[in-house]
Amino acid sequence: MKRIAIIPGDGIGIDVTREAVKVLRTVGEILGRPFELLEFDYGADKYLREGITLPAGALDAFRNEFDAIFLGALGDPRVPDMKHASDILFGLRFGLDLYVNHRPVKLLDAALTPLKDRTEADVNFVIFRENTEGLYSGVGGFFKKDSPDEVATQLDINTRKGVERIIEYAFQYAAGHGLTRVTMSDKSNALRYGHDLWQRVFQVVRARYPQIEANHWYIDALTMQMVKNPGQFQVIVTCNMFGDIITDLGAQLQGGMGMAASGNIHPQGTSMFEPVHGSAPKYAGKNVANPLGAILAVQMMLEHLGLAEPARWVEEAVVQAIRQKKTTRDVGGTLGTRQVGDAVCELIYSVAS
């Protein structure tokens, strides 16, 4: 039995996580091996009530007692500085050393892409974003804050270990999935030191995989190419900040933020899966949020846990839901959040039978 921690989060995170849990229960029922799902109330309500973001001992519990974590969206206007969201999300990513951010960019139906005359074959690649370093490492500070002479610094931290292991993971993924091209993207023509390290390490790692074509785009050129000719990409690997930007562009190519899922991976440890959209508090509880990104995050989790066939059931059920218009309005349907979750579960039974 797989043991999974569920953190619904805030806003529509709670709404879509409920549908993701339905899918997990459906898959467990079909397999005859229910998942053990334990819910944690980490979010704005707990923070405002108790002043607690991640309790003491939470990281050890997740690391040692769970096979995976499912995280809903975080963010609440009652916490203007979003301290709880930052503490929970970055606390989990950094505390569990989830150094791989895995973002599939996979168009499931041609009608969903804003690109003219593009099909499912044209938008089908994966982006690996370094997840624990870079500009998001939190190194920096203020000098003479709130004065006319204020100085703010934010350091871009790139270690040899961190850069090498994310590039290595990208090549390993390509080799293990029958892919033949890995693209590294940086801004080494302007950001000389950290991105010079990315260039040098990329050359070292690519030499270990002579069967895989390795190429490079500067990040500004890459964003243009993702729109102009997305079919040229199979695996993209880049740093934390650039990865954050281009994965949201990728989400739009596949149908919007409501369709995008991600994995925060440690290959030898407990990994975390989440939809990538925000908490959208004004829509919370109104039965309008698209749960398909959350459901596709479940699909990623199942695949990561070695359950490839159930993962296929989930993806195929989502594809059928889209084609049958059993979706929310943002992707062409008329159903509410709960009804989409129910429809996907019914389709899973059909696909698996």
Image (cartoon, helix red, strand yellow):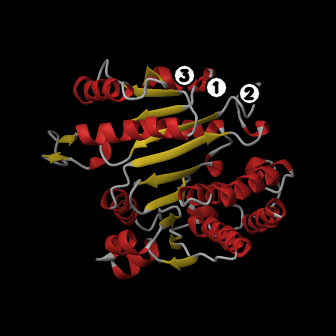
Looking at the image, tell me whether mark 2 or mark 3 is earlier in sequence order: 2
The one nearer the camera, 199 or 20, is 199
Please give the name of the residue rendered at 48% of the width and 62% of the height, measured from the top-left corner.
74
Density class for disc 3 (Cα within 10 Å; few <14, some 14-19, many ≥20) is few
Name the element at disc 3. helix
Density class for disc 1 (Cα within 10 Å; few <14, some 14-19, many ≥20) is some
Distance from disc 2 to disc 1, alpha carbons, whole Å, reads: 9 Å
Q: Is residue 285 above or below residue 95?
A: below
The one nearer the camera, 186 or 197, is 197
Name the amino acid, label 1.
Answer: Gly
Confirm whether residue 88 shows in the render: yes
Name the amino acid, label 3.
Answer: Met
Whether the residues at callouts 2 and 1 have beta carbons within 8 Å, the answer is yes
* Quarter of the image where one finds residue 62: bottom left
The one nearer the camera, 196 or 252, is 196
Looking at the image, tell me whether mark 2 or mark 1 is earlier in sequence order: 2
